[in-house]
Image (cartoon, helix red, strand yellow):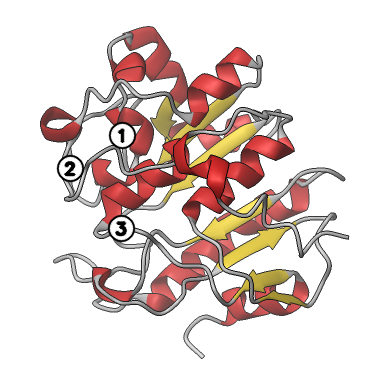
Amino acid sequence: SNAPYITGLTNTYAYTTNYSTNYHPSLPNYLDMVSGTNQGVTADGTPATLGNITAKHLGDQLDAAQISWREYGEDMGGPCVVKDSGNYATKHIPFLFFKDITATPATCQDRVVDYANDFATDLVAPRRFSMISPNLCNDMHGGTASCLIGSVATGDTWLKTNAGAIVNKLGPTDVLFIVWDEETGSTGTAPILCIPIGPLVKGGTKSAKAYTHESLLRTIEEGFGITTYLANAASVPSAINDVWK
């Protein structure tokens, strides 16, 4: 009842009931989502403490295939910001933890940018892959001094405001995935939602198959015609493939 917009999306499009995460807390899951493993990271941290990862990631694959991409962090304040500030948390910006991104300032400043400064402009002519991470107030974790604890309604309102423009922009082969990083309280075992949205999705579909962030990564790889899968993405279900028309 606190998330009417999200509930409406699940009714209109599709959602998962058996999507789980392999790690806790947040950062290992974000790394898993873009590289197929947690890269040995088992705690939250900043690029200064846990960065300089040299493993291959999704951005590398997209670059090799000449597929444009960007990651957008809400409240980042500028491009390639590697320090936490206010409601901006680097633990939710996984590409900042890979050395080949942060070691080249021009690359980092082009690929990892502030959501408010850049996304609305980019939406006119979107990158082929975009990843958006809301701030600590809008990500439904709650619990920060300036946010409502248990801010499900806050996150739902933010998503309605921000996702609506994206949904309206989707072309015939575009897909928007809305997904959470982990289970409730960073320790739960209940499944999390993944909501695929777009013209290719069978409306009203409820998928009970077992999926993880690595399945989502493989879905993205397959969608772009990438056939060499990263780390554990090579051994998970081929894709979130039971929701498509």
In terms of image quadrants, where is residue 49? top left
Q: Residue furthest bottom?
A: 1
63 vs 148: above or below: above
Q: CA distance from mark 2 to mark 1?
A: 9 Å
- Residue 14: mark: none
Q: Which residue is mark 3?
A: 23
Amino acid type of the residue that numbered disc 2 sits on in the rendered structure: Ser
Say which element carries label 1.
loop
Instruction: Report the quarter where the C terminus lies.
Output: bottom right
The one nearer the camera, 185 or 23, is 23
Identify which residue is drawn at 30% across, 20% down. Answer: 54
- Give the left or right position of residue 222, taking residue 53 as reference: right
Say which element carries label 3.
loop
The image position of residue 211, as x and y in percent, is 55, 62
Amino acid type of the residue that numbered disc 3 sits on in the rendered structure: Tyr
Residue 74 in view (yes/no): no
- Give the left or right position of residue 97, taking residue 223 as reference: left
Which of the two labelled residues, at mark 2 and mark 3, occupies the earlier sequence position? 3
Are there few (<14), some (14-19), or many (20+) residues within 10 Å of tag 3?
Answer: many
- Residue 85: mark: 2
The one nearer the camera, 28 or 87, is 28
Q: Which residue is mark 1?
A: 77
Q: Residue furthest front?
A: 235
Which of the two labelled residues, at mark 1 and mark 3, occupies the earlier sequence position? 3
The image position of residue 80, as x and y in percent, is 32, 24
The image position of residue 120, as x and y in percent, is 58, 38
Identify which residue is drawn at 45% across, 33% down. Answer: 117
Are there few (<14), some (14-19), or many (20+) residues within 10 Å of tag 2?
Answer: few
